[in-house]
């Protein structure tokens, strides 16, 4: 508890990695919106495994069945429930009594007195990001119908960096959205992929950073005090398994900056108040200022690794050496790109729906 | 909207910097808890200005009047409302039509169609952290009565760093809590303070990072999916004006780490499952694992600076040079230390109150 | 817990009858709305005691001090907090160890382990309806600016009935709003007042029913499934101390009706779909149909009576005869009229603010 | 919006009468609770049609598939999602452009700009009470494991009354739970059933009242101010299609009572504080006092009747005579009995789960 997020757009998520299925209920979608289901599939495919050695070998079609809220691919205004069956599960890879370091195995065991479905991480599995991506795919279409664009790329894997966002436009987002390893400067792909492969070959994993942006949204989104856009968005981002940090605009670099460097001076351009810099990442006082929203999220290296690790047997209480068999991504970041885009879409939509007279 | 946070402990905050007063309603406090009001005063004094040249010259007693929920310094179980009068206000320092870069002046103007109380940032002022610190001071006492300790220090100001948390214990937190410029290694104070003074003398400001920790709390706090402890805490942290980033445990450094480095292997020590490392910052899968919670928050350099900046006149639409007169902190971090501790206390208490059969 | 209501308009209420003060925080008011404070006073005065023998002798000015959210009588968009000091309190009238039958004395004692502020009912006092009336007075002004009108009258006291609503229009609501004993047919006042006076003289109290209506609101307010307008409104109505039942439209009489009698057939009148009857009380499927909203609320006879009653001493555990000294209304209904109007106003406003694209 | 209810036990409901399926997500169930699925089936069967001429001819197995939150019939602590496929649908019985009087057809059309799935009432169908009964069946089992019992009976159909609750005990609830037409005095069945059959034969329907009670729950459930047990429960009850009124204890009869009649004097019996009467229906100040909870709910006569009614064509704007073909219950009350029990179970469980230190 709690599986619910949002105020104006409300999400209710459920499911366990190796149970009957996973899914999400989305309430607050505008009635009469035509959903492009082909585009939803394409959007979700960007999250799916299948990048060869770069991702897990677990095959999931992630076919979403929509049970409600849509009639002939048009929203009815009632809550939309999408479910995804679990298919390619290999539960024997998981040993309930040996919690995998770095995962929720131990904490879930404590939280639920040992009754949690531990198989594949159960409710804590990264697999739960599939329904999140599904919901985000719909939100994104609603936003796009209003001229709002969202894009993201891999900024860092191991020590290798892509270029950060500078010029943000539709062409760039098109390019990023079409790639299964989205980078601003594609020449950075090589070393990054090598780093992932090397980690994988050594039975290990590697961390990464995803940078995400949006433009075309109105100024004035977000609220004081506890529902600043950053509060709202970070609460969603930290629901994604593996997230360990987030920063907006210049983020942690601001610690070493002067106010005169970090402030974005206001200018009048074509009748709009704007700025030539975007140190704030498009948000002041928790509310969008009309400049692109820019934020970065760091993902820990995948916790499930083949290398031997120390753990404790929950039944006997003895220390044990653990070698994990299952199929796991050596790096979360590539598949997380579309999930990060999705949660930004959901957050913006919740914010846009805010009621006003 | 919205001024409300929390599920089991509920906060409702209100007030504007130069209005009649600010305050907070706290619901969910256990009945029969004796509040040490002297300690509350001491706790809140750590947030108050009055660090000489290091902080704003605005004098605020921040005397809290408790209107309800407490009888003879014992909680009654009813919502506790504390209010703080605004006294030393100099509204003429604020010009409504010239939004200060880096602040919420422009975004609040857009959000509220120009009706926001702009004086001193109005509802967006850092002054709103006073009631937050008040609430946190109470939550902290409840937590301490259960053996839970919280502490924080200034980790970075400008380019100058303090040592990060390593050994976390009561003695350290005592020392930090007693200082108005809390550092793990006090010899770092000199260069940090000089940096602040220099910025101040140049009519400028400087950023900083606060590192916060807790120990003594139980494993099992926090919830899947959307109420991970990190989700809950970050949503509160990003309510604090000036926050631009947060990271848990090894945070952004995890991007360059291998899983085998980042995972905290489990060990059995004195009958408890624990770990010799704490890369995860005490949280796995959004739930506490019993190790200390560790996180860092970056604060932008104070946006209100004396140096001339560019802005746009909201009435005439003309570009203008702006020189801000008011009294402002040259660095947010020192006063933010106790605010960060407060929001962690509030978040932990909300989590501990979670209902279970 | 919980002191919070509403989704788009959010209320946070606090206070105890004999503590420092009571109040309410209202979030979600539109920015830039000019509040007529004279009218607020008049609205709240309708709730105040001072109907001679018909009401309690406790004198309360119920002067509201607005701490935030309003600048020069115009809303700023930030949460509006109004507080009311407790003045004419006579705490000695209350004996903590002898719970008064029919009140929350015993249940509050159990709930809060004896730490509740029992004086005058503490947080459970009908006095808490003063801030509710204050908030409702503001909501009503916002609604009136959009052509929505709300009115109520005393339908029943003891066995004496007023006429139920038939023709609902502005003239009627004007008349009801101007009266301190509002009736559709004023000739019913005599027997009702006599009934109250008789009960009072005998150290007793009497129950009553208030009927409330609204018109001028749009069709389409309220939501499926759990936020039907009836769900939303009844949750507020049952917050009012003394409420024991509510019915919409023909209400309980519908048990004996046929569908062909109870259905309101649709007609086209002046281009609008409407009905010549209003058995549904203006709501179908939890959503307004454009016809007047009509509902009735029953208030128990005031629990605090002078007549001797049996109770149990919470300290000694002995049965005791209790004679209550304090000053109490012999009948809740007359003062509840404006409170019922207020909660309808709050509920409609919350509903109107619902976000839609 | 909104499809979500509850604070500690959270429900998220979805589905439309003639769509792919309906269902509910339940979050907050204790982990490790063994669900008796046979008993769930029996519980839900009490809601199903199949009372011959007394109920609709629509056949629904209401087979619930549990997708998550349960492993080998034991709860895992993760959200439990149950779905029910729609099978025996005859959509051609519904004409989108002719709203049926007394139903949500018109209001849903307005709310969702004509995009609502109108077939069978869509999201507003009484069919949505199936997942509610499912959730309530689980909650009831949790409550029963703690000694809490819930029961209900038909109190009124047309002008015919059953006896109201007097002696409330397990034997009575056993008897009521085993009957598909539950009455305290079974000799009242004849006239009631005749009334239903007569209405049905005339192409009409008839209203009814259900009376529900609980015992064995602790005193102290429910909260001030906005989460009184009555607020919480009525918000759920008014989600059930067809509800038009609710009253607790003596309810509307209290309007004609004196305080000295309506108050339940406290007595000490076997060390417990209790009362010999229960005019308050077990609730004072919104909090349970330990006496049985007793409340009554009135259901309008089924709106969908065969008799000719007047309506307006939403496309042409012309007045039309409407004759409804579909299969409908001539009386809601008999099938609503278990739904009312279910929502009480859900409400009590939410309340019991309230977090306290």
Image (spheres, coloured by chain):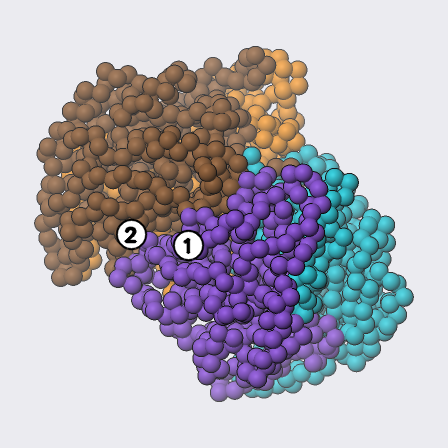
Chain colours: A purple, B cyan, C orange, D brown
Mark 2, residue position: D20
Q: Mark 2 lies on which chain?
A: D
Q: Which residue is drawn at 17% across and 30% down?
A: D52
Quick check: do tags 1 and 2 share a chain? Answer: no
Q: Which of C354 and C43 is in front in this view?
A: C354
- Where is the C terminus of chain A found, in terms of image quarters? bottom left
What residue sits 61% from the left and 67% below the top? Answer: A201
Residue ID at (26%, 17%): D186
Position of residue D313 measured from the top left corner of the image (x, y, whole percent) = 14, 57
Q: Mark 1 points at which residue?
A: A87
* Rendered residue at 16%/31% (across/down): D53
Q: In which quarter of the image is residue A313?
A: top right
Q: Say how many tags the image has.
A: 2
Which chain is home to disc 1? Answer: A
Residue B294 position within the rendered picture, expressed as x and y whole percent measured from the top left: 72, 57
Secondary structure of the residue carrying tag 2 is: loop
Q: Where is residue B138 in the image (x, y as percent from the top left)?
A: 71, 46
| Label placed on residue C217 | none
Is residue D276 depicted above or below C354 in this figure?
A: above
């Amino acid at each position: 508890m709690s599986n619910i997020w949002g105020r104006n757009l409300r999400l209710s998520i459920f499911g366990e990695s190796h149970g009957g299925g996973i899914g999400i209920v989305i309430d607050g979608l505008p009635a009469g919106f035509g959903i492009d289901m082909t585009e939803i599939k394409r959007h979700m495919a960007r999250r799916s495994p299948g990048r060869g050695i770069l991702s897990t070998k677990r095959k999931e079609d992630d076919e979403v069945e929509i049970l409600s809220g849509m009639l002939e691919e048009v929203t009815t205004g009632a809550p939309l429930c999408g479910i995804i069956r679990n298919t390619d599960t290999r539960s024997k890879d998981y040993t309930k009594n040996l919690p995998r370091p770095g995962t929720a195995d131990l904490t879930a065991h404590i939280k639920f007195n040992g009754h949690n479905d531990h198989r594949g991480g159960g409710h804590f599995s990264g697999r739960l990001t599939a329904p999140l991506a599904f919901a985000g795919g719909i939100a994104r279409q609603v936003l796009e119908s209003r001229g709002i664009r969202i894009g993201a790329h891999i900024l860092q894997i191991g020590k290798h960096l892509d270029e950060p966002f500078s010029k943000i436009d539709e062409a760039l987002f098109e390019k990023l959205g079409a790639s299964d390893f989205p980078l601003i400067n594609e020449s950075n792909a090589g070393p990054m992929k090598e780093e992932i492969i090397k980690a994988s070959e050594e039975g290990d994993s590697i961390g990464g950073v995803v940078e995400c942006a949006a433009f075309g949204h109105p100024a004035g989104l977000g609220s004081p005090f506890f529902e600043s856009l950053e509060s709202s968005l970070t609460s969603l981002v930290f629901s994604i398994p593996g997230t360990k940090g987030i920063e907006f605009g210049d983020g942690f670099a601001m610690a070493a900056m002067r106010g005169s460097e970090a402030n974005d001076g206001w200018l009048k351009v074509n009748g709009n108040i704007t700025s030539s810099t975007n140190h704030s990442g498009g948000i002041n006082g928790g509310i969008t200022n009309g400049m692109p929203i820019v934020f970065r999220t760091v993902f820990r290296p995948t916790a499930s690794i083949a290398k031997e690790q120390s753990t404790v047997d929950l039944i006997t209480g003895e220390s044990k050496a653990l070698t994990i068999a299952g199929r796991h991504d050596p790096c979360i970041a590539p598949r997380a790109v579309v999930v990060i885009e999705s949660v930004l879409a959901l957050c913006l939509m919740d914010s846009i729906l805010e009621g006003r007279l």
